[in-house]
Amino acid sequence: MMKRFWLSTTFSATVLLTFGSAWSQTAPDTQMRSSFRSAMEQIEKLRQRQDQEAFVEQAQLLQFGLPISEINPLRKAQPIEVERLLERALANPGPHWPSAAVRRAKMLLVRDKEQASSERAVELLRRAAAMQNREAAYLLAGLMEAGAGVPRDIAAAKGLYQVALRLGHGPAGLALARLESDATKANVFATQGLRLLFQDARQGSADAAKTLADHYRATSDSAPERLSVALEWYRRASDLGDPEASLRLGRMRLDPKTTLYQPQEARSAFEKAANGGLVEAALVLAEDPHKGGTLGVPVDEAELWLNRALETKESRALLLGAEIYSQQGSEGREKAKSLLTEALQNVDDDPGVLVALGRQLRNGDLIERNLPRAIALFDKAAIEGNATASYEYARTVLSYPDAATEPMRKAAIARLQAAAELGHVKAAISLGDALLNGNGVAPSASEAVRWYEKAAAGGATMALIRLGDYYALRSDGVEISRALEWYRKGADANISTAMIRLGRMYSEGQGVPQDYALAATWLSRAAAAGSGPAMVELSALYSRAGGPGHFNLARDVLEKAVRAGDTRASIALAKLYLARGERALAESALRKIAESGDTEAALQLAELYLSGGADQLNQARRWLSAAEKGASGNDGLMVRIALLQMKDPGTARHGAAVLESLARKNNTEAMTSLAQALMEGIGVQPDANRAEALLRRAIQLGNDNARFVLAKAYREGNGIEKNPERAVALYREIYNDEPGDTKVLLALGDAYVRGEGVTRDRALATQFYALAAQNGDPEGKMHLGMAYLYGGGVPHDGAKAERLLAQAGEASLMMARLQLGDAKASGMGAAIDPEGAFASFLRAAESGSPEAMIEVARALKKGFGTQRDPALAQSWLERAARMGAQDALYELYRMNAVATDAKPQEAERWLLQAAQNGHPAAMYHLALRYRPPSADQNSIDGNEWLAKAAQAGHWQAIKAIRKKKLPEPGDSDDDD
């Protein structure tokens, strides 16, 4: 049936559109000044009259809106005055009563959702339909079809549609065709409806032409010929003076997914719509330079349209103005705050506006945080059935329990479910999280899994990780094969997190036979996909596993994939070589595929050369240039190339320019990277305000990494003003969306340990560290191990502490190895274990830890856990000293000063070096040795070193200065 209907309507449209001679192109709009004066004269004449017809015509004009001024064509509707005029028109019977009734009913249905308003609208439409008003019959039929404001009654709806059709209302024929099951009857109704619309359009009805365009567009199923017909009808309606048709024409021409894509014609259409008074079209023009400049609107013209839109005081315009100005330094931010404040004072019913304002109030960036009002705005938009608003309402209520009541929490779950059922995948994931954790609802693992699976079916890749984590961590390991299945699906979707999870499972033998080769294969693939954590894990795997066998097996797997034509495998193989420290082999593997024209390999090769020092810069530049040529049109690759270019002073400015260009196209990765450059002053002048604004914009557009970057900047005060409270709030938001993000879990744990942005709470900190450890994060295991070691938030448990610290140490965390050594040396672990302590310190020292080298030297000096060997001890200390360790310099002084075979001159040399490198105790000892100064002391001033020691916090130096007396040498030698 639909195919015949499709062919019939296409044929009819084609025939009628060939009658080009029947159409005359309308003359261009008159000048703004003339148009404004004409509108003012027309409305003034109508105001002089007090008859029903004048009231209806006034209402029609004011509903569309009057031009703002002689130099601003944008129009602003006056709904309150329109309502008043229509009510006056409805007060007495007359020939224009039905028209007034239809307009008033539409306003009641759109602007007011209360039952009484719906009932009145239905009554007005009934009366108007009884008076043979075809539009009233059509609208009332639509309400009956949908069951909106009246009981659903398809038979009655069909009857009213037929009445409207008999009265000459073309859209009624299309509605009947949609409801008719008989294909022949459906084609009859459609033909009748279309002929009526064609007739009205040929007689100059812009509404009819626009309705035809809407019909062909809605039934096109992306077929080019029907889209072309729709485009032509929009053009006809636009020529007949319908600004809304011009707007829709512009949007069709701006859709890059169709063959109709023509940005220049789109711009012309938007300009026509804006000159016709549409604020929405003006906003499209105003934001073009800030969204990549697809339309080519010059900056000064965009600014002109923005200022015109702001004059209307419409919330959408105020929000866009705030977004644009917030990126223009401190003055711009102040202006943005003013615009947002104004928008909040004139909130309309637009769900998009309500959601945007709610986010501003929740985030507390440009305006003061107000969670109750944010929730109220989300609630208002959600009532209208907006799925995004429902999700934001639930997310806010569940993330900020102190701002919510129990009824709100119940509503949040209901809203999440409603949004999820409408296909909002983030809502489905959040609902799964709430059900899994019992947040606002009774816990139900089976229901959580059901919603995760629904989100996964909807294309949400993060749902694949959620499902894998559930079966790996929550199902007591009994369904570990399901975890493997979901992680593999994630890996197939090129999600590096899934690849890392698979690598860990095989590395640790979690539910699968332990297989270091497979672990290395998956981690190599994740590293090739650009994951830094995967590279760390891969290196840790070889540090732990050792031996050539596993490496050879992993290499064989990857080489087999390379032979099968998998270019990603070639890059993964290079990463495997790098993890083994075999740089030359990695370079050779990358060069081979890069020379064949692979852009990713060229990029990886350039990164390798950049890490090789100044002598390899030319090679890096060569391959970056090759990568840039090959990445043309691939914005994701261009961001990565620009980031590498900014690491090279010679290409930093070019890299920054590329990021600027991509950021203007609303590329959120470019925004995030450019913000980081602005915070650090790399390739650009530092600009904290713009960096913050860019990150906020990227967050609004859904970039979760931008949230993490901004949170970290707030936490550390890196490039922007330090704000621990905002940092924690952002980390909390990310945690609620991604509870398995270990970076966020660690950051929250650190915040609660230190009391930064929150009340100090070691028990809660430990819970976050435990979650990170549960997700396999080595740092999480280290922090949790330290908590058990020192009884921080959990009871002391030396055995658990040692086990966790050992696992973290196997991942090459030097601090974990140091802590494990301390635990074994002090007996705070399972028991005093000198040999175990020395082994742990030695592993950390061999990995390059200066602190561990000092501990190894101390053990060798005393023979603690190993054979005594002072010469080897000195060798380790000298190695640590060469790495800049102050304590190593001071230990060398002590070793040479107090040994049985003391070496005073060597001791003196090391003491002076330690003091010059800022060691407080060395400074103090130097002060003791040279007091008071004399001509034969190599110009060493004991008083000067005493002052420096006190300034560095040495308590004995501080005490001596206060007493104005140094102790005699030897009075206290153990002062470090």
Image (tube, rainbow, N blue to C red):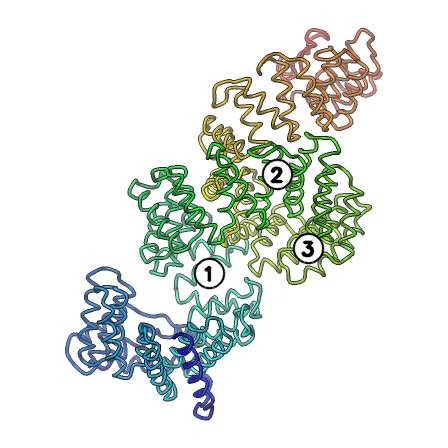
Give the labeled residue for mark 1: 320
Of pointers 2 and 3, the one earlier in the residue sequence: 2
- The amino acid on which the numbered mark 1 sits, given as a three-letter code, is Leu
* Left or right, 146 with reference to 38: left
Asked which secondary structure carries label 2, the reply is helix
> For the residues marked 1 and 2, what is the alpha-carbon distance in whole angstroms?
45 Å
Residue 270, horizontal then vertical, whole percent: 48, 73
Task: Give the quarter of the image for residue 39.
Answer: bottom left
| Residue under numbered circle 2 | 503
**How far separated are the C-alphas under marks 2 and 3?**
34 Å
Q: Are marks 3 and 1 in contact (CB under 8 Å)?
A: no
> Where does the image place residue 541, in percent across and percent down from the top left?
67, 33
For label 1, the crowd category at 10 Å Cα-Cα, with few meaning under 14, some 14 to 19 and many 20 or more, is many
Which one is earlier in the sequence, the residue at label 3 or at label 1?
1
- 551 or 429, which lies in front? 551
Q: Amino acid at mark 2?
A: Gly
Residue tagged by mark 3? 655
Q: What amino acid is labelled 3 in the image? A: Gly
In the image, residue 900 sits, relative to residue 893, either above or below, namely above
